[in-house]
Amino acid sequence: MSSIETGGRFSRKTCPFPTPVDRAAVENIVKPFILDDAVYKRVCDVMLDNFNKGLGKETNAEARVKMFPTYVRSVPDGTEEGDFLALDLGGTNFRVLLISLKGQEVNMESKIFLIPQHIMLGTGIQLFDHIADCIYKFMKEQKIEKKTLPLGFTFSFPCKQLGLAKAKLTTWTKGFKCEGVEGNDIVQLLHEAIKRKGDMEVECLAVINDTVGALMSCAHSDRQCAIGLILGTGTNACYIEKLENVGLWDSDYNDPKEVIINTEWGAMGDDGGLDFLITEYDKHVDKHSINGGKQIYEKMISGMYMGEIVRLVLEKLRRNGLLFGGVGSEELSKRGRFYTKYVSEIESDVDESDFKSTKQVFEELELTNYTDEDCRIALYVCSLVSTRAAYLASAGIATLLNKMGRKDVSVAVDGSLYRFHPHFHDLMVEKIEKLVTPGIRFKLMLSHDGSGKGAALVAAVANRLRDEEAKKEKDCKPNED
Ligand code: BGC
């Protein structure tokens, strides 16, 4: 087969289809995504090594996977009550929520606000002023602006926690890069912005990661839940660890002798530890990202990058005359234009004979020169890239399950990739079963709105503890009468 198009501008004119497609040539281009179990076992080994390094007092400084202790020591017991505000920042949207807890009953009102790109890449002051504006608007709408409500903040970026309500951002991830925030306490930045705004009384009692929110939210009704996993714009996991294994721990050893660890596993591979499986497409994605060299494992898995990986493979196939008769489109040539939701849509085409969703995606990308064979190849590429992502995430979860050694564990999972991809759940169950120590049983459970409910639950516990402390102090004071 001859190479039809070798880059440069595209012609939208139709040209003859290369038939039959050279299957061996297609296989050759996609084969770096097909990995056997030995490779995934090696990923588990690298992961465990990273976890142990992160947890060790002496090794943490140089570790890439930071294993941050969260100061969340106990999961909710279902007795939490009251009205709470929650904030959720970390994906493409920002949400403000009003949550009423009454035992197992949870009522929520929420509003989504967009964070414009110029704010995502602007200054920290602009970002937090925008957040304070959104909180104010929401409170006015809910007619609660005169109330003083405790607030839980789900802030889904790597933070070194210095307490439940003190968290320093170590580095931005995903699409954010606001100046003047890294190294600073985000609760302080939030409180300062609320003060600048004026006219409202809000006190942030807890900052949590979205993985912790997912775990807390599931643990509210399932006592076996001990891992929280996010597969969305980014990826990360947290789990319950025994204090004796946390060399970093610098607080008390009271019961429960456990703490939730936010692994920040997305950073695995930043030291070259995953180079044995990195493809040219992964390198390209990393090179053109706003955080080059960082979050290598995340970039192979999560929704912010998966569509782009697929696009790069499709473009390579096209350039080699193996797709669309070598004729692409302006749209397909644009970085970031092939959204991860397209991967889920294309893979939903069960009835291969009509390829309805795939053709719709092609139309959206202004591709006109396609055949059923092209649909079949695009579906194949999507499935290889998403399967690798699901298997890599499975290696992470299997490592955690093996490390924890509990017999029965529920894993709380949230995030758009997991929710909307038609096969992610099944692929993960299949691969975790292969990688986990025999005898360990696990369940992957969809966590409902962990970022909102989880933050409210942690704030509720913090609020109760604070009230108890205040009461204790009052009872201890000598009677002044
Ligand atoms: C962040 C994590 C977060 C994950 C999922 C990553 O980019 O570093 O803190 O949990 O995305 O939202």
Image (tube, grey):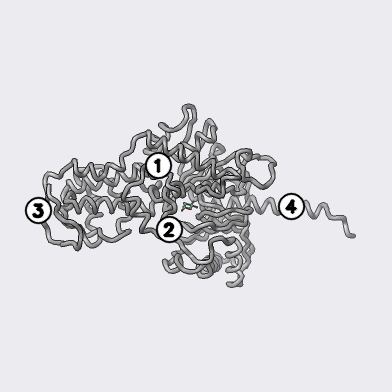
Pointer 4 or 3: first along the chain: 3
Circle 4 Cα neighbour tier, 10 Å, few/some/many (<14 / 14–19 / ≥20):
few
The mark tally for this picture is 4
Q: Check disc 2 and give the amino acid type.
A: Asn
Residue 181 located left or right of residue 302? right
Q: Can residue 53 be seen in this view?
A: yes
- The image quadrant of residue 261 is top right
Q: Mark 3 points at which residue?
A: 16
Which numbered circle lies on residue 291? 2
Q: Which of marks 4 and 3 is in front?
A: 3
Please tell me whether mark 3 sits on a helix, a strand or a loop.
loop
Amino acid carrying mark 1 in the image: Leu
Quote the CA–CA distance across marks 3 and 1.
39 Å
Disc 3 residue type?
A: Pro
Q: Mark 4 points at which residue?
A: 469
* Residue located 75% across and 55% down the image: 470
Position of 7 with respect to 415 (left or right) is left
Q: If you read the primary sequence from the N terminus, does the residue marked by circle 1 or circle 4 appear first?
A: 1
